[in-house]
Each structure stands twice: as structure tokens, then as C-alpha cells.
Image (cartoon, rainbow, N blue to C red):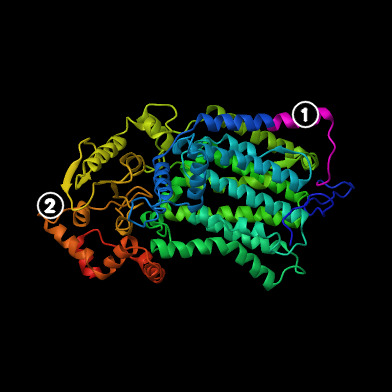
Amino acid sequence: MTATLPTSGAQVDHAAPPVSESTEVGDEITLSPAATRAVGVVWVLLGASFAWAVWSRRWMSDDGFINLRIVDNLLSGHGPVFNIGERVEAGTSPLWLAVLALGRVAAGWSLSTEWIAVTLGIACSLAAVGVVAFTQRRAWKSPTLPAALLVWVAIPSVWDFSSSGLETPLLWLWLASAAGLLMIRAVHRPTAAPCQPWWLCVLVGLGPLIRPDAAVYSACFIVVLVALAPSSSRSWRTASRAVGIALALPVAYEVFRAGYFGVLVPNTGLAKEAGSAQWASGFAYLRDALSFGSTWAALVVATALAAVLIRTGMVRPGLRRVWITCWAAAALHLTWVLRVGGDFMHARMILADVLLILLPVATVPLGALRRTPARLGPLLLALLALWAVAVAGTQRVSPRSPYSDSVVDERTAYLSWAGVDHPVELADHRRHIWQHWGESARRSAARGDAVVLIAERPAAALERIPSTGPTAIAWGNIGMLGLSAGHHVIVIDRIGLSDAYAARMDPIPGGRIGHAKWMPLVWIEARYGAAEASIDPRVATARAALECPRLRELHDAVSAPLTPRRFLRNLVQAPALTRLRIPSDPSQAVDELC
């Protein structure tokens, strides 16, 4: 086996020679010094413009602060948890948390955790563009110009989510790397076995560690990795080896997840009911995303450019398979996004699909442009450039979607609340009530108060309920609040992202996509309040429900000391605990669970 992807002296698979020509598109084309400088200037201007746009939109989202609290707990020796003593997987991306933790270890002496997250996100976004340019230049073995990549770098939502503290830029970088290296392999190593090189198998299998739904992308990449090998190099043994190598890390983490957290999916997947079907909301979300600046039109033009190149015979089967895989992966993932109802953040969940649709013709070789019939190539490239200039220069996302009440431009909202242009650090959000609530909880914990603080909008004051444990605070947005409250405060997430009970409760009919759950106060009092704190009979009923065998098992899975026996028991119980649902009404919970 080899760990290199050679680019010289290798067979070129993607560029068939035109009938009357003896030179393939994939052959090196010698440019004049002036033309070389012009191409270089185009790439420099594109990179500089994108870097400026991304930097100009730097910010940190509330969900990004959730990741930072988890990293703080991890590096403090409490494990990858949101609340100390509660093994609940509140983070969606294990790999992004690992990247943040490594960044904190390497640069925490000079940068705040917030700036480390924002800087790493921007670096991943810029690196994704660089990887696309590099890998496609190697795959075509010819000088290239940016084509559909112009669309990608002009979308303001891409600028927004290049920071924000979320794993989104890491997903883009992984997609660009996996797809780009598959293109190179299809062109330069057409006879290699599926498991060669081994590290490419590892790379294409990383999707589930970045986001659970990215398993769709990994599955498609693994299929094409096996399909690229000719029958002489492909056997059940080599294919199985490739699949085994690709799945080794995700499977190992899944075993850890089941044993440590006692569940088969992140707690966020349970909270957002990622298995539910909400097609109407999904299509409203898609319309909101693609109507902005007529993004759909740019996707049509990019697809037309790919079709022109394929029709001219310039793209041979190996490369064409990778292109089709990118489109198929985007279609499958987009179908899942539509089914679960989309998201509450404008465009976030489909940006990876947009990138995959654009990737095949993100750049195009100069030779291919010259050989398209009726100058269609240059014309389509010009249309893409005009769209990019128009959208990047004039379009702005509205704060609230005209198509869906639940879709919001999160960055605009947080800027208006913070009152600053670039709210990155927690201190930049000091005007926000969530941070003030967190600071109140921190002060209560410092005094040793045994109290549960109940936050309710629009009141700034916190209701206080006596408890038997340390200070706790209950609210539905836990990022800023949790980081400002500190490690010694239990943050009760009523939406359920970090709470094992709320995540399993009934969603509110017509609730916000992704945040449609809200744990009733009676359950909070039953779990954390002192025995004499409430005379509400429903609290007593909820306490009785908590003693039901299935809820006792849930409690032990996330709170009992993690011994080897507990780990193994969690492994066995994980499927049942993943399926477990808790009625919001305590009486119904007793009837169903006891």
C-alpha cells in the first residue's frame, strides 16, 4: 500500500481527447507569463475577498458557547459533559470538540476560548476553499479558474457560519478534502484497490464524527471509493477492508457513546426529534434558504456547466462517478433535512449540500472552457461571476424569514441584542439577559445557596425554589447562560439539548423546529426541589414517575459512578434508552412507565 497520490507520470482518466485533437484536457497547458500572472491575480483576489468577508462577519452563537462549556469541563477533568456529574452528550460534533480542546491546549495561554473557536472556524472555512482549488488543479492536471466556487464564496450565510463557534466550517473542510482527494484518486490511481491508500478510507469515514447526519456523506463516499477500483483490483476482501478501515473510528466512538452516555445518538438528536417527519416545515426552510439572492438560479447554472463538460466527452468515467456521488450525497442529505423540518437558523443545514452541488465544477480548466461548443463554457462562467458580484455586493439576509416563522438570521439577532458589531467573547454579550441570569446563578453558587433559579421571559428577576442540592438554574438557551454561570452551577436545559429527561419529552405542537420541547416546571421541582418546596400534587406524581424502573435506569445511566460494570450495562441498555420517551404530563408518565 502507498500513502501518496502521485500526479506525474500517471494515467489521466478524466479528460478524453477531442476527435480532431491529440492533446487531452488533462495535459499540462503552458501559459504565457502574462496569462499565468492573470490567473494568479484572479485566485489571490478571490481568496483575499473571501477572507475579508468572513472576518467582517465574525461572531459567536449561543450554541457555540455550549461547546465552550463542554471543552472547559473536559479539560478540567470532568469529561465531555455540560453539567458536572451528568453524562449527557450536549455537543453534536465529537471531532469539533476535539479540535477546540486541542486549540485550547495549544493557544489557551494567549487567546480566550471564544477567540480560539472563532479563529479555528474561519481557518477551516478558508482552508476548504484552498483545498478545493488545490485538489481540482491536481485532478485536472491543468491550470484552473474559479467557476462555481464564485457562488460559494459570495453567499453571506457562508460568511456567517465560518465563525459562530459551530462545527459547520469543519464539515465544509472535510467535504472539500474527501471529494477532492477522491477526484485525484479517480484520475491518477484508477487501478488502485479500494483500501489504497488506507488514510483516504479513514478520511471518508469521518462524517459521523463531525455531525451524525454526515453519515450520509460518508456512506456515499465509501461506495464510490469501492466503485472506482476496476474489477481486477476489487474483491469482497479488499472492499470489506476499505469499509472496515473507514468505519473503524466512527464505530469505536459509537461504542464509547453507548457505554459512557448510555445512548446511541447525541442528546441533541433526541431533543430535536431528528427521526420525525415535518415535510411542510422542511420545504419552507428550503425556500427560505434558496430564495435568498436566487441561489437556486446559481445552482442551476453550475449544474448546466457540469452537464456541458460531460456532454463534450471531456470528463471520463472515473471523475464522472465522483461528480455523481457528490450530487447524490447532497440529494440524500437534503431529503433528510426536508423530512425533519429544516432548522431554525437560516440556510445552515443545507450549506453543505450547496457545497457538494457546486464542487464538481468549483473550478474549471482553461482547456475545457475553450472546447465547449458555442462558447457555452465562458458564457456560463460569466453568469456565475455576475451572480456572485450581485449577491455579495447587494443582498442582505432579513432578520426573520418571510416564508417560515421559525427561521431566523441568528447573527443579525445576536448583533442587535449585543449592541456591538462583532460579539465574540462572552463579555461582548453583557447586555443580554441570559448572561445576567448566569451571573446571578454564579453568585448564588458562591454563597452556597441550595436553590433552583427559574428564568422566565420577559421578567429579569429569577424565581427561587428551595432545593436539596447545589445551585441550579433552569432555562431553554444554555450557551451564554451556562458559560457565565460557571462549572459549579447545574444548568437545567428545558429544551433538552443537555438534559436527558427534557430531550425525551413530548414536543410542543407547532413548536420551533429543533427547539420544540419544553420541560414543565413540575418535573424541575420533582427532580431538584426540596421535598417541602411545593404543595402542587403534580410534583408528587412526577416524583413517583421518577421512581419508575425505566426512569431509574435512565438516571443511573447518566448519573451513577462510571464503573466498568456501569459502562457495560449502558452498552446493553443504550438501544432501549434511545427509544425511551417521557410524557410531559406526570400522570400519563406514571401510567406508561410504571
Q: Position of residue 456 (x, y in %)?
A: 23, 41
Q: Which type of secondary structure does the marked residue at label 2 adopt?
A: loop
Q: Which type of secondary structure does the marked residue at label 1 adopt?
A: helix
Q: Residue at x 66, y 57 (%)?
A: 199
Is residue 416 placed above or below 132 in the rendered structure? Answer: above
Name the amino acid type tagged 2: Ala
Name the amino acid type tagged 1: Arg
- Mark 1–mark 2 CB contact (< 8 Å): no
Residue in the foreground of this view, choosing between 135 and 67: 67
Residue in the foreground of this view, choosing between 139 and 543: 543
- In reply to whether residue 35 is colored magenta, the answer given is yes
The segment highlighted magenta reads: 26-43
Residue in the foreground of this view, choosing between 514 and 544: 544
Task: Judge whether residue 124 can be spotted in this image.
Answer: yes
Quadrant where the image shows the N terminus: bottom right
Quadrant where the image shows the C terminus: bottom left
Q: Residue at x 21, y 59 (%)?
A: 585
Q: Position of residue 193 (x, y in %)?
A: 73, 64
